[in-house]
Amino acid sequence: MKFTYKKGMGIGGWLTNYKRFNVLPTDKRLVITIGDMEHFESYIDESDVINIKNMGLDHIRLGFDQIVLECEPYKYREKIFAILEKFVGWCEKHGLGIVLNLHKAIGNYCDIEESVTLFDSEELQNRFISLWLELEKRFAHKENVMFELLNEVREIEPDLWNDLAEKTINAIRQVNKTRKIIIGPICWNNPNKLHLLRVFDDENVIYTFHVYDPSEFTHQRGVLQWAQLYYNRKLEYPCDDIERYRDYYRLLFNKQDAYSHISKMDIEYMREILAPAIEFTKKHPDKELWCGEFGTIRHADIKSRENWMRDVITILKENNIPYSVWNYLSTPNDGNRFSLVDDDTRVILSKEMLKIINGDV
C-alpha cells in the first residue's frame, strides 16, 4: 500500500504530555507509575485511528517520551513497545501513515530545567541514538512508519543539534537506507531557524517546522507560559485592534515598538511568519518540507481558532507544504490543551474546523 503524508493529525497526551513534570519533586519527574501505565494502556485505541481516518486525514504524528520507552539506559519497556506495535498495526490496517516523534528526550525537555542537557552529554547522545536503532529494529519492515528524531530542540548552537542529527541519521542508514527521517531546526522548530539546519544529500530526509505565532493568541491564558498567564486576556484572530497585541509586550516586556510595522493581525502577518519556510522550499526545491505541528489552545474562541487555522493552511497549500495539525486529544494534565475533539465523545469540535484541516479553505 502506498502511504501519503499530506494532511495529518498529531496525538499528544498519550505517550507524551501525560503529566506535567514541573509540578513534581525533582526525584519523581522521570518515574513511570502504575497510573501512568494504566493511562498508556487505555487512552487511545483502534477506534481513535478509525476516527482520524474518517476525518479524511492520511497520517498520524504520534509523540512519545524517551522515559516511556526506556526503563533504564539501553533497556526498554516491552509493554510500551507492544502498545506502539499495536498502534502501528492499526494505522497500517486503516491505510494511515505514521510519524513516530520523540517528543521529549532525556536532556531536552521543554517544561523542566535539567542539570545535564542532551547536548552536553556523550552518554545521553549514545542513548538517544541507541533508542532510534531499537525503533528501527522493531519497525524494520513497516513502510508506513517515519521517524522524527526530536521535537522542538531548544535554543542552542545549531551545530550541536546538526551534528547529533547527522550521527543518528548515519547510524540508521547503516541498517536501513530508505527509512524516512524527519528533522527540524533549533529554537523549538521555529521556521526562521530553518536556514541553520544542515541539509543532507539524502532523498529520504524530510525537514520540518512548527507554527504558533502569534503566541499571545495561540497560547492565550495558558498556564505553562508565565507571560500568557500573567496577561490573562482573551484575544481574537484576525484582529483589527492591534493595540490589544501591542499591549501584551508593553505590559510584560516594556517593548514600545512591538508590532509597529503591522496594522492588524491577519493572514498577511502569517505570511511574514511563514516566509522563511517558503524561502527554504525555493532554496531547496529537491527537498521535502513538512509543517509538523500548529494549533491553538482549546479555550480560545472557536471562530478565531478556525480563522487562524484557515490562514495557516491556506499559506501551506499555496506552497505545496504538507502538514499535521496539533492536536487530537488532551489529558486533564495537559496545561496547554490544544485538542480538536471533545474529551468524551471524541467528535470534532467544529465541522468548519474539519473542513479547514482537510484543506477546504
Image (spheres, rainbow, N blue to C red):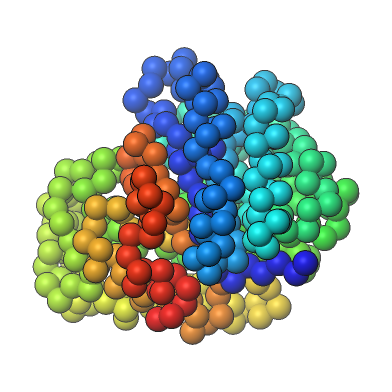
144 vs 123: above or below: below
Can the viewer see residue 180?
A: yes
Asked which quadrant contains residue 246, the reply is bottom left
Residue 234, relative to residue 7: is it above or below? above
Name the residue furthest top.
27
Q: Residue at x 78, y 58 (%)?
A: 143
Q: How many marks?
A: 0
Residue sitting at x 59%, y 48%? 46
Locate residue 108 relative to residue 94 in the image: left or right: left
Between 244 and 36, the residue placed more toward the observer is 36
**Image quarter hosting the C terminus:** bottom left
For this view, does 143 lie left or right of residue 327? Answer: right
Q: Is residue 184 left or right of residue 217?
A: right
Nearer to me, 174 or 84: 84
In the foreground, 90 or 143: 90
Say which quadrant the N terminus sits in.
bottom right
Where on the picture, by quarter, is residue 135? top right
Task: Give coordinates of residue 119: x percent, y percent.
Answer: 60, 38
280 vs 228: above or below: below
Percent of width and height locating residue 25:
39, 17
Residue 104 appears in the figure? no
Residue extending farthest bottom: 318
Counting from the top left corner in percent of width and height, residue 193 is at 50, 62
Give 211 or 65, whichever is nearer the viewer: 65
Name the residue: 56% across, 43% down: 45
Residue beneath the point at 54% across and 37% down: 15
